[in-house]
Amino acid sequence: MSARLMLKDDVLLNAGAELVAASQKMSHNSKGVPGECASITGIGADVRAYLVNVQDGRLALADAAKTGSAAVAQIMESSGQLDQHIGATLQAGFALKAREK
């Protein structure tokens, strides 16, 4: 039995919207990394490095979400074009014929 992949337009539309929203939140909700943190134990440089890495990760995830959203939009566009092509290619009564038993 072959595997089937079903992509529904409403699910793709929702996925694209969620990716765009996530991307905007991650890229617009970032604050600058503070300068050196004073600490009794001397871990200020490590804390700053961690915060820089978190910021880099947030921006990388935002970029990935944008890329994913663009891919979803492209799939939806291709699907629409395919639907139009199939509709134009098939004869008018194709889907209306009753099956014979």
Image (tube, rainbow, N blue to C red):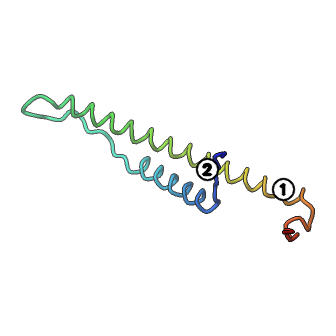
Q: Position of residue 48 (x, y in %)?
A: 24, 33
Amino acid residing under circle 2: Val
Label 2 element class: helix
* Closer-to-camera residue (37/24): 24
Could you give the CA–CA distance between mark 1 and mark 2, rounded to whole angstroms? 21 Å
Which residue is drawn at the image coordinates 11% and 34% (left, top)? 39
- Determine which residue is flagged by label 2: 72
Q: Residue furthest front?
A: 101
Which residue is drawn at the image coordinates 37% and 46% (left, top)? 30
Q: Position of residue 54 (x, y in %)?
A: 33, 38
Q: Position of residue 23 (x, y in %)?
A: 48, 49
Mark 1 surroundings: few (<14), some (14-19) or many (≥20) residues within 10 A:
few
Which residue is drawn at the image coordinates 38% and 51% (left, top)? 29
Q: Residue furthest left?
A: 40
| Callouts 1 and 2 close, C-beta under 8 Å | no
Mark 2 surroundings: few (<14), some (14-19) or many (≥20) residues within 10 A:
many
**Quarter assignment of residue 86:** bottom right
* Closer-to-camera residue (61/32): 61
Amino acid residing under circle 1: Ile
Q: Which mark is residue 86?
A: 1
- Name the side, left or right, on which 52 lies relative to 74: left
**Quadrant into which the C terminus falls:** bottom right
**Quarter assignment of residue 71:** top right
